[in-house]
Amino acid sequence: MNSGIYVNREMECDSVFRMLGPVFNANTPENHPLVFSNEDDFKVAMSVLAVCSRVHSRIRIYAFQLMSNHIHFVVGGEVGDIMEFFDYFVSRLRKALGGGMDLSGFTLKLFPVTDLSYMRNAIVYVNRNGFVVNRNVTPFSYPWGSSQCFFQPLAARYVLAAGEPIGNSRLRALMHSRSCDEFKDLEMIDGYVSPLEFCDVGTAERLFRDAAQYFNLISRNVEVYSEVAKSIGESVFFSDSDLFQVALKLAKQCYGASDLRTLNVSDKLDLARRLHFDYNAGNKQIHRLLKIEQNTLESLFRAKNS
């Protein structure tokens, strides 16, 4: 991409962002007890979320991910409207999952998204979240969120070809009410409402210069994931392959080494500290990457924390 096109595309993306109004990177506590214990629970939650977001039409979801015990959103709207939407969602979710679950601690924290760069990073962080904990999916195939839809034209065609309306009977059973009957045409895929029915993926995609930029951020820019996690107070855990990318980059930047095996003992220990404290790497991971003995690592971090 030549410089003129690059600048123009960045200006277009920034213009889209500025038109969104208030946007927040939002999440519920990651230490909450299990909420969704099986596939049926996730399907129910996806559909309840779809209906609730339609009821509260003043909010706009740009990306989301349902995890087993917490939820991530990139959501636009006024704070009061977002919290009203979320309270409604939690109340309906509790009923839909049987009514006996304690969701009193299932609260939403909001972190303002202040510029285009952070908006992109927040979307990537949310869409990558399921992949980080479930090694059987990619950032493009986790089913319980918006990641399956970004820059995936086949997903939209699939909904058109195979989707079926939720209908009044299923909608009333889901929401325990007739008050949402106007949303009976929401399209379902594989037993739950498609994210394309309530997540504004089209606008979110326009915040990236192109599909290539999105792919690069979600698949290669591992450090972005760490930065966003820290900004919202979450713990972050990297796979060995992700951590290897980080370690190799740090080795080049900090020690002028292009191969981890060429690091001297002092540099290895310093790199181990960086991986442990900045990237939440465990001793076993660091041992596998840097070949430092476990007892050395235990002594190193015990001394640092004392």
Image (cartoon, helix red, strand yellow):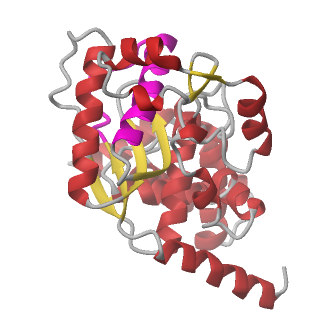
- Residue 148 coordinates in the image, percent (x, y): 65, 38
Q: Residue at x 35, y 39 (%)?
A: 55
Between 19 and 248, which is closer to the camera in this rendering? 19
Up/down of 189 relative to 60, above or below? above
Query: Residue visible at 47% across and 54% down?
Result: 226
Residue 139, located in which quarter of the rendered image? top right
Q: Is residue 48 located in the magenta-colored stretch of the structure? A: yes
Place of residue 266 in the rendered image (x, y in percent of width and height, measured from the top left): 52, 61
For the question of whether residue 233 can be seen, the reply is yes
Question: Extreme bottom residue here?
Answer: 4
Residue 119 location, x and y as percent? Answer: 49, 65
Q: Residue furthest right?
A: 2
Taking the spot 54% from the left edge, 20% from the top edge, the residue there is 166
Mark yes or no: residue 265 visible: no
Compared with 262, 244 (above or below) is above
The residue segment tinted magenta is 28-55
Please name whichever residue, 49 or 113, is drawn nearer the observer in this view of the structure. Answer: 49
At 71% from the left edge and 79% from the top edge, which residue is drawn?
9
Residue 49 lies in quadrant: top left
Q: Main secondary structure of the magenta part?
A: helix
In the depicted structure, whether residue 21 falls above or below residue 293 = below
Find residue 72 and report its horizontal and vertical position in percent: 41, 42
In the rendered image, the quadrant that contains the N terminus is bottom right
